[in-house]
Amino acid sequence: MNIKLHDPTVFRVYQWLQQDPKRPETASEFVRAFKEHFDRTFQTFKEFCKKEFQKELGDYRIDLDEKEKPKRRHVRKRVLSSEPPEGFPSIDAHMQLDMFYFYFLVLREGEFSPSEAVVPMPPVEKPPEHEAFIGDGYILYAELKDFDEHDENELKEASAEFIEAQKIVEDTKDNISENLITLKKDNFFLAFLNPLAFRDVPECIAVVLLPQEVAQEEWTMTLLYGSAMDILLQIIRLSYIYRVYEENGLREEVFDRERQLDGLLRALAASGTEVGRNKRFRRRSIRLKRRKVHKFTLKELEDSVIRIFEEQKRFIEDVSQVQELINAGKIALRNFELISRDKPIEDGTLGNSLVNRMKFVVEQMEGDCRFFDITRQQAELALSSIHTRTEIEENRAERVLAILFGIFVVFEFIQAFPEIPLITRIFISIFGISTVFYLVKHKFEKLTRWLT
């Protein structure tokens, strides 16, 4: 393989959320964090350009008001204070749909073999740990004189060497090549590294190779700054979803909630019975056990409802976060297909390949959600059961009170007529108490409705 890369270029991309969809008030905070990150990166980049390329950059800033949240979603809108600096190196920033992103790019002039095409990069700080920060990535770009002479496998190997030379991924060229999702057309080559295969590499990586004779045509700018950038941003988002769910502990947190809720449900079921020795029957020296129904007090039922309800509320909140990630992941997967079918790519196989290699993230979360839904249904059933049992206990209590009140009325009636003989009093007491028990047992609901 005798491939030479002309003017290798590296784009460094950072992606941020505009706001938390559930908390619109976070817009100003997210804008401020995005601007601060850009300012720090720009100062480092500015010093780097002066030292390495003797190029003086002006003062660039993010043209966004921290006090005012974005009023509408744009397909792509520049948010830099002015046009980006001409030539190379350069820096630019945009808002797109529900996110911000900025990038800087550095070019190394000359022709190099892929393993030698190392582009010097500024020593930028590690990306901040902020809830609005989605992730970062690279686009590696170069031109080839003899593009048509190389097949897809050769360009794939060259891309793997190009990535390996930048020291972004600490792995062998062969392993990098195996995890590249590629597309070769007559006038361009695209490759995207599957980020899920390198969990210790937070950055997402794309490679764009073009024939040198078409590199200045207008459509190539659309391919590089449009299609390739958009796919990379979707890969960054999907990688972020995976990181939040698997590595940042959301999955384990939801499973912990599920275990706690399931433990409460099991404890409730266990406390509904008491196991004792059956002393009457013995067979072959084995003591049989019998269950005694535990009669819950109203307070026990109320406490059970409160504990289960509070745990269920926290559990549902966590599950809703997982469902939001699932929806975002499905959108990213769908975008792979749409972008790859649009100009200038116009080839759905790339989108299908991206979907097939990374859709298991969404499928895993959907599978977990089905188990979570079973626990949620069990909790709802337990709450419904407790509610029914509470009504039964309340009805029993009302009947007891009715009986006591009826007995009280009977004795008060007897005391009101002291001249009645003792035998008659006894007869009236027996008849009155019997009437009270009969009414409470057989006519309680009708009597209650009549009295109210």
Image (spheres, helix red, strand yellow):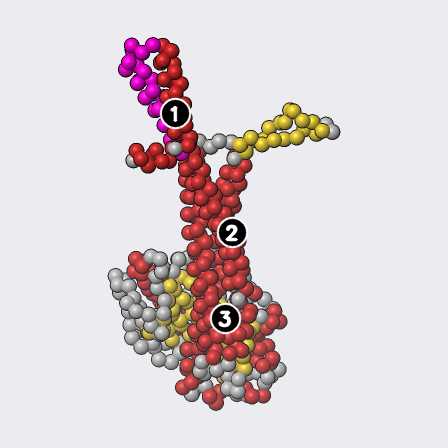
Q: Residue at x 53, y 67 (%)?
A: 358
Q: Earlier in the sequence, mark 1 or mark 3?
A: 3
- According to the picture, the residue beneath numbered tag 3 turns out to be 205
Alpha carbons under labels 2 and 3: distance apart: 39 Å
Please name the amino acid that badge 3 sits on: Ile
Please give the range of residues in magenta.
Answer: 394-421
Whether label 1 touches label 2, CB < 8 Å:
no
- 67 vs 142: above or below: above
Magenta highlight on residue 418: yes
| Spot occupied by residue 374 in the image (x, y as percentages of width and height) | 51, 51
Badge 3: how crowded within 10 Å, few (<14), some, or many (20+)? many
| Residue 277 makes an appearance in the image | yes
Where disc 3 sits, the SS reads strand
- Give the left or right position of residue 208, taking residue 289 as reference: left
Foreground of the two, 92 or 291? 291
Circle 1 sits on which residue? 435
Cα separation between marks 1 and 3? 87 Å
The residue beneath circle 2 is 374
> Percent x, y for residue 257?
48, 47
Q: Residue at x 59, y 66 (%)?
A: 171
Residue 252 percent across, percent down from the top left: 51, 51
Q: Mark 1 vs mark 2: which is more N-terminal?
A: 2
- Going by the picture, which residue comes out furthest to the right? 284
Helix, strand or loop at disc 2?
helix
